[in-house]
Amino acid sequence: MRQNRPIPYWIRTRTDNTIRYNAKRRHWRRVMDAEVYRAATVGSWEGLNSVPWGDQLTPTGNTVLHVYVGSTLKRRNMNIEFIKNVLDQEAQWGTRSPLWHENDNGDIPLHLAARFGRLEAVEEFLRRAKLVNDDERRRMLMKTNKRKDTALHEAARGGYSRIVKLLVEADPSCPYEANDAKETPLYLAAERGCAGCVTAILNTWAPSALAYDHKGPCGRTALHVFVQWKQSDMVSKILDKDESLIRVRDDEGSTPLHRAAAENKPELLKDLLHYDKTAESAAYIRDNQGRTPLHIATLNFSWESILALIGRRPDCIEIVDNKGQNVVHYAAKYWACIKKLEFLLKLQNVSKLMNEKDLDGNTPLHLVAASMPHITCHCIYQVIRFIDSQEPYANLFNNQNLTAGDIVASYDFSERLYVAQPRRSMRLARQKLPMCGRIAKKSKSEDARTTAKHELEKRVTLLTAAAPNQLVVAALVATVSFTAGFTIPGGFNQNPGPDIGTAVFSEKNAFKAFLICDALAFTLSSLAVLQYFHAASAVLPTTIERQLRFAKLYCVYSIGAMMVAFVSGVYAVIPHSPRLQAALLIISAFFFAFYAGSLLAAPLQSFMVHYRSCPGPRIPYAVRAAKRRGIRLIHV
């Protein structure tokens, strides 16, 4: 059994509870008094003179020097005299040096001063260490805590550029290893995004002491971080030191060139390519999924990056990923825009990739056909025409013995085409779809017919459910507009003469607008009622759908005409008062804003869906960009 550690005499004679045994360090510790702690926090030398404080520690092993430099109290200037007075009290400290005292985390005062940005304290600590000798200062610079962090690690993590510069200039040849988290000071400065810290490290450190290619968390180097933060100036500085960093891969297999392509930053990618001068270019390096930077740029449709990569390394277009897919496969699979794909094929030597197959035997045409269910109806005809135009490649079979035309013919686009352009679309679809593949001449499957029928019945059910309420609205609008036509604003002229019985405000433009809009509201609402009447007696679902859609349209327009009639009628009878007229127009403007929004909601939604499905620069811009880089375009 382990024997208890003997208690010193000076501890046995004390009657307070300020003495504790530190089981972790296996020694007795005198707990710091509250007065001493408060004085150390604010840097009050007078508060320390009253009691002996040299052997007092906080529960975490901090001395008064740790407490002062690590205090989070905001102050403009560091009380350097307090630090000097504490260091000069050799009688208080005894044989142990306060500069080298470690707390429970292994931090010496220099660690805390660098962590909290205490520049004056760092200067004083280094000066005191140099008074001994240069080796003492070097040993202090390389001193690590339990996380293997040096003072430079702490300063770089906090982004204190002046402290970083001071530490690296103290000994430029001092090597700094990675901490337990695999972070070097350069990596921490890059992760922090502190350009001043990075500049100080790169400009001061000796190349032999700087591990440029050291991999940090996730296997990333400082260059990966610079690219992620889009700091082109820092990228140039570190590549001036070591150009081989551009070919270092992280845990995902990505090089900085992959990251630049993923961030969609063409200018940054061009800067990287400027330093990529070896035969084993980073443009040929594949990540863990087999993708090159060109694959990543194509995936994100970064057109400038695509042109830069092809212009610098034209043969990188032939590299395939782990699925056997090249850059044209990616464009066909992810772009969902035939116009952009057609322009990509005009680049030199790209069109020859159209007959390349992936591991599933699919050519880019197969992937174009497979993406049709996910594109808008406006692009369906472009896809069909594109497949028809690629005659040499349209007859290639995949591993399932299907051509691109077979895949297109297996889809039923009739419902989607009918919504966009009812009659013209269906007629064009009947002309184009059967010409696409070997199985296209077969009749539609029974499942496709059943699905189309169910979709039509669902729409008719929804319209029929809303028809009674819409009929009530149309009837109310017709009633109100009919009544307003005979109870006109201002009344009739009762004075004997040729104008007796006519409207009083017949000469006002506002009254004329009232009559026209009121008649329009009555006509449209009456047509809506008539359409609902015909829809109730119709038999075919398509006829019912058409009648109900027109009735709803007439009803919506009649409401707008009724509101215009109301505003113009009130405007005609109110006295000549600019304030009243302005108030009337402003109040009515709210209705017309919501009314216009409801009318434009559906067309705008359709336009935005089509626009978003075709992102990226337009073709003329892409042509100019290709010509600027000397990339020859060919016609395919």
Image (cartoon, rainbow, N blue to C red):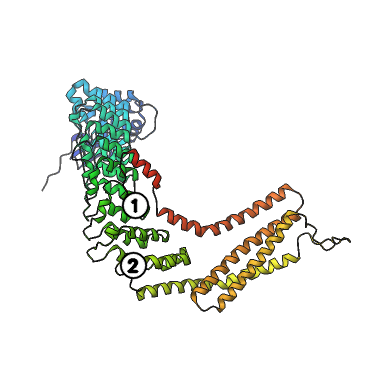
Tell me the quarter of the picture where residue 244 sits. top left
Q: Does the rendering let one see residue 487? A: yes
- Label pair 1/2, CB-CB below 8 angstroms: no
In-front residue for pair 586/430 = 430
In the rendered image, residue 359, in percent from the top left (x then y), is placed at 21, 59
Q: Which amino acid does label 2 sit on?
A: Ala
Q: Residues within 10 Å of mark 2 (few under 14, many from 20)?
A: many
Tell me the quarter of the picture where residue 623 sits. top left
In-front residue for pair 12/631 = 631
Residue at mark 1 to residue at mark 2: CA–CA distance: 22 Å
Q: In this view, does 328 lie above or below 102?
A: below
In the rendered image, residue 392, in percent from the top left (x then y), is placed at 27, 58
Q: Which mark is residue 342?
A: 1
Q: Is residue 569 left or right of residue 541?
A: right
Q: Earlier in the sequence, mark 1 or mark 2?
A: 1
Q: Does the rendering let one see residue 116? A: no
Q: What element carries label 1?
A: helix
Q: What residue type is labelled 1?
A: Glu
- Residue at x-position 15% and y-position 39%: 6
In the rendered image, residue 106, in percent from the top left (x then y), is placed at 22, 37
Q: In this view, does 544 lie to the left or right of 417?
A: right
Residue highlighted by disc 2? 409
Q: Which mark is residue 245?
A: none
